[in-house]
Amino acid sequence: MLLNPLEKIVDSLPYGDGFKFVDQLLEIDEHSVIGVYRFQKIEYFYQHHFKDHPVTPGVILIECMAQIGLACLGTYLIQEKEGRPQFVFTENHITFLNTVLPETTVIVTAKKEYFRFGKLKVLVQMIDENENKIAEGWMSGMILSK
């Protein structure tokens, strides 16, 4: 099966199925990325995080934003280099505005603020399928070639 360029980026991410929070990329270019993930009710963390009323942990939402906003965009920005890049998450400032319940689809948009000397900083926003804003802020990371 041949993968399109967006599917190749998602497929190349260095995460296993139990920790990959990217289902699909909708758009990507040298300035921004838009990606989607659906939080299934069978996710491992829901059975322990507010077990009577499961809520997606904030750290998982940040990871989802980082995978789409930093790892996917970073992979696209250095795609001409050989090998699979490594990503090191360095810092973030995220404000949470709503919760994410099981079976919610989130859309993450990240816009590149800068990419130099291997450091990528993005402005990031997460909304749900009803366009309710979940979180927003900025994050950065280092992209290292192996």
Image (cartoon, rainbow, N blue to C red):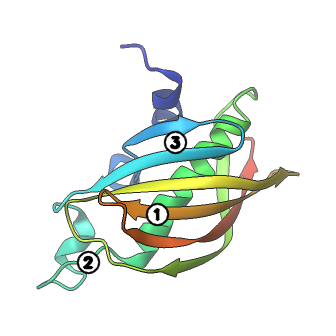
Give the side of residue 37 with respect to residue 111, left or right.
left
Q: Is residue 11 above or below residue 101?
A: above
Q: Nearer the viewer, mark 2 or mark 1?
A: 1
Q: Which residue is mark 1?
A: 126
Q: Which residue is mark 2?
A: 55
Q: Is residue 77 above or below residue 97?
A: above
Give the side of residue 66 with respect to residue 46, left or right.
right
Residue 143: percent from the left, percent from the top?
Answer: 73, 50
What's the residue at 50%, 30% (across, down)? 6
Taking the view exactly as shown, the residue that stands out farthest to the right is 117
Q: Amino acid at mark 2?
A: Val
Q: Nearer the viewer, mark 3 or mark 1?
A: 1
N-term-proximal mark, 3 vs 2: 3
Taking the view exactly as shown, the residue that stands out farthest to the front is 131
Residue 33: percent from the left, percent from the top?
Answer: 58, 45
Q: Quadrant of the N terminus?
A: top left
Q: Nearer the viewer, residue 78 or 124?
A: 124
Q: Is residue 8 visible?
A: yes
Q: Nearer the viewer, mark 3 or mark 2?
A: 2
Residue 98: percent from the left, percent from the top?
Answer: 37, 78
